[in-house]
Amino acid sequence: MKSISLTRPIIEDEMVEAVTTALKNEYFLRGKSVELFEEEFAKYIGVKYAIAVNSGTSALYLSLLALGIGEGDKVLTTPATFIATANAIVYTGAEPFFVDITLDTYNIDTVKIKEKLEEDNGAIKAVIPVHLYGYPCDMGEIYKIAREYDIKIVEDACQAHGAIYKGKKVGAFGDTAAFSFYSTKNMVVAGDGGMVITDEKEIADKISSLRDVGRDKDIQGVHKYIGYTSRMNTINAAFGRVQLKYLDAWNQKRGEIARRYMEELEDIGDIILPPEQSSQYISVWHLFVIRTKHRDELKKFLDKKGIQCGIHYQLPIHLQPPYLKMGYHEGMLPESEKWAKEVLSIPMHPELTDDEIEYVAFCIREFFKNKKRKGKWM
Ligand SMILES: Cc1ncc(COP(=O)(O)O)c(C=O)c1O
């Protein structure tokens, strides 16, 4: 039986060689490769500074700290994301203030951001828009609102390396942005890794110090802050530098695969396809996510056909156990609650073949045909 994986990182010889060279010639930590990776990543996005860290979660957390977020503050974000987005807020002592999504894009509803800010009495200090599945948020509107209400923006671009909003790469709109190189992402390192980007020197310097135990880079032996051990190691940076060279070609391939899926699946009326691309919103298709009321059954069916699918995510964050304990409850964010019940990620990675795409589409069609034939609609 065929077996089609949901995702697969690509490892070329060039990447392994880069790691070996770095191991033999550089320090494990603070090696030259880290600095070069930072420079190249900043240039790729089109910002002044990039600071390599040990995960996307650290990138978010250190961003918030550097922007002065802490106890007594509230930070807006959506519950329709990976739990790490909200955890980063909790780590600072601030409170995550969840805003619902729009089901058209699965991204934060900008009208609701404004409503929250209107209701608030000044405790909201920042917003974390998440470019979910690689599809850009409406950064123009978010930027306008943030300036009007004087709040900071930390973009969660952990799933959106290279996505473009109105001609500019996502990540370049916020006060800072966080990227993850976790092993399912569009580009990876050899383990966990992340990057913060910013145009502000002061913020870049603070994050650079915070990730390195608060070290003062100018005065030997002095630690300016209570920092963390959140550095990216040299091996990961060496690996990531080569991955970055391939990123655009891989993203393009993902785009072609998404178009093929769209063509193959558009006539199946029982599923909702991902938002269409336009010249204003260019997704990098981190995941290809369909939506159906019959999600769990379809997933089981595809599993049996050797097609690995995923659920991103099973619960909106406000319904995860630690958040329920904080007082969030069901019914607070209906669009996100519906989203979590219906989304299904089908295989998406640059090496997916035409045959595999056709097979996945064939099986999805077969599932709905069978269901109709048996008259088992619920
Ligand atoms: C949207 C989002 N935010 C944050 C993270 C956290 O990144 P990491 O797993 O590298 O800590 C991830 C990745 O898993 C993510 O997908």
Image: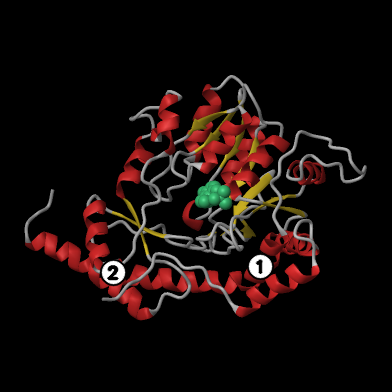
Locate residue 130, reporting x and y percent: 53, 46
Label number found at residue 151:
none
Q: Is residue 252 above or below residue 160?
A: below
Locate residue 186, reporting x and y percent: 54, 63
Question: Residue 195 or 291: which is nearer the viewer?
Answer: 195
Instruction: Quickly name the residue at label 1.
Output: 239
- What is the number of callouts on the image? 2
Question: Tag 1 or tag 2, which sits nearer the N-term?
Answer: 1
| Residue depicted at 89% across the width and 41% down the height | 221
| Residue depicted at 41% across the width and 57% down the height | 275
| Residue depicted at 42% across the width and 66% down the height | 348
Q: Quadrant of residue 180?
A: bottom right
Q: Is residue 220 above or below residue 360?
A: above
Locate residue 336, reporting x and y percent: 38, 40
Label number found at residue 306:
2
Question: Residue 262 or 201: which is nearer the viewer?
Answer: 201
Question: Residue 90 or 46: which is nearer the viewer?
Answer: 90
Q: Amino acid at mark 2?
A: Gly
